[in-house]
């Protein structure tokens, strides 16, 4: 009879001593296999692409790409990979950001190996694990974020189609010359659209505009075809 496949685990933690200890402990479990390790966010993304883990155990303070940002990118590139975020303390913001980025589990680094093993099996099975003491504040935070998102959408609804396109391009790092080229307008006209957009939103700079769009999850509501084209290095008509 064929043995069931082991759960493939990636460990993304900066400190070698912790990684080694976790690998040794997890490899003792009959149903777990550590298929890769990473010391920072960029290495974690590369390891996910190479090893296709079922579960990624990620430190919340990874160098180069923070744990939540790494989680977002992993979920974009490997949607079936379940993510557990490890942190030194009960960090409410990290928990909420991690869940928004697709993480399924949240543990502090003082948890036992047994708790981590249980968490790996649970998230691989589709469960979400959150410390009970953090559930109340989490719900409050989620409600607040939803309210902020709806308010942001209302503000964006006052923009013209062209101004929404400009905001989408700015949020994706476009400079004035690139906005002009993408929209087939002059740089002077592009600057006018930028200033009008900032004025309607009550913002003072392109950086504020980009932060506003990204933090409120507005890119899909602005001009997704422009965003996709820019991300792929192509032009839209």
Image (cartoon, rainbow, N blue to C red):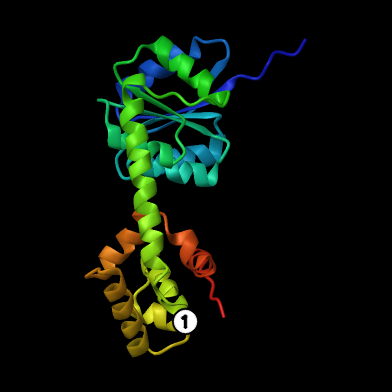
Q: Is residue 31 above or below residue 102?
A: above
Residue at image location 57% in from the left, 80% down from the top: 237
Number of residues whose C-alpha sits closer than 10 Å to that of mark 1, classed few (under 14), some (14–19) or many (20 or more): some
Q: Residue 101's quadrant in the figure? A: top left
Q: Position of residue 229 (x, y in %)?
A: 53, 68
**Residue 39 visible (yes or no):** no
Residue at image location 58% in from the left, 36% down from the top: 80
Residue at image location 48% in from the left, 37% down from the top: 47
Q: Position of residue 224 (x, y in %)?
A: 52, 65
Q: Is residue 3 above or below residue 188?
A: above
- Please give left or right for residue 127 compared with residue 204 in the image: right
Q: Residue 166's quadrant in the figure? A: bottom left
Q: Secondary structure at mark 1?
A: helix
Q: Position of residue 62 (x, y in %)?
A: 31, 37
- Please give left or right for residue 31 compared with residue 108 in the image: right
Of 53 and 126, which appears nearest the observer?
A: 126
């Amino acid at each position: 009879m064929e043995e069931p496949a082991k759960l493939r685990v990636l460990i993304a933690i900066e400190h070698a001593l912790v990684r080694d200890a976790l690998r040794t402990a997890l490899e003792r479990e009959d149903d777990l296999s550590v298929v890769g390790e990473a010391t920072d966010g960029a290495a974690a993304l590369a390891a996910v692409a190479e090893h296709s883990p079922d579960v990624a155990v990620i430190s919340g303070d990874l160098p180069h790409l923070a744990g939540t940002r790494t989680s977002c990118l992993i979920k974009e590139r490997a949607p079936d990979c379940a993510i557990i975020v490890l942190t030194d303390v009960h960090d409410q913001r990290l928990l909420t950001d991690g869940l928004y980025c697709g993480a399924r589990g949240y543990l502090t680094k003082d948890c036992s190996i047994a708790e981590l093993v249980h968490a790996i099996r649970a998230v691989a099975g589709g469960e979400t694990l959150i410390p009970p003491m953090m559930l109340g504040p989490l719900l409050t935070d989620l409600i607040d974020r939803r309210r902020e998102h709806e308010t942001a959408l209302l503000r964006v609804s006052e923009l013209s189609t062209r101004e929404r396109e400009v905001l989408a391009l700015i949020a994706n790092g476009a400079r004035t010359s690139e906005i002009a080229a993408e929209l087939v307008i002059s740089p002077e006209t592009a600057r006018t659209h930028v200033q009008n957009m900032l004025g309607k939103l009550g913002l003072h700079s392109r950086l504020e505009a980009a932060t506003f769009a990204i933090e409120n999850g507005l890119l899909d509501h602005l001009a997704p075809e422009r965003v996709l084209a820019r991300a792929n290095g192509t032009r839209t008509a």
